[in-house]
Image (cartoon, rainbow, N blue to C red):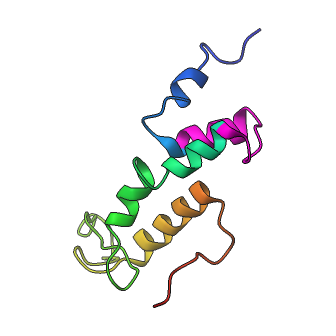
Amino acid sequence: MAILKANPLPWLLEKDNPSVRYLALTEIMDLPPSHPEASEAKAAIMESGTVPNILAKQNDQGRWLLENTFNGRFAVNIEQKGKPSKWVTLNAIRALRAYFGLGKTPRHDTA
């Protein structure tokens, strides 16, 4: 008996989202990162898809702003819209770690 109703792999391997393609190649298909297809997908991660979108929203202090808020819907207000958000920054770094396989401390350039 099949667990999945259909095979999602062809969809995950489409080149429109290189981050998803890289993870599908290395984590689902078990290709080594050095495999040409995996290397190509990893190189494309910074060109299009999720990672450039996440990085484009980072401010000069390395933080991400809160764009939407649920304040007024909870018993207490958590953070202010338009201000740096520790939760948004934490989740952005977590997403980048997942895409890049970074260690516990994210890399940053120092000038």
Q: Is residue 38 left or right of residue 54?
A: right
Tell me the residue at 33%/65% (across/down): 56
Which quarter of the figure has residue 38? Answer: top right
Front residue of 92 and 78: 92
Tell me the residue at 50%/82% (across/down): 109
Q: Is residue 96 magenta?
A: no
Q: Position of residue 73 (x, y in %)?
A: 27, 63
Q: Is residue 23 magenta?
A: yes
Query: Where does the magenta region start and end?
Result: 20-36
Above or below residue 54? Residue 14 is above
Quarter of the picture holding the C terminus: bottom left
Which quarter of the figure has residue 106? Answer: bottom right
Q: Is residue 55 left or right of residue 110?
A: left
Above or below residue 104? Residue 9 is above
Q: Is residue 77 left or right of residue 6?
A: left
How many numbered discs?
0
Tell me the residue at 57%/55% (across/down): 99
Q: Position of residue 92 (x, y in %)?
A: 46, 65
Above or below residue 47? Residue 37 is above
Tell me the residue at 72%/47% (across/down): 33
Front residue of 105 and 71: 105
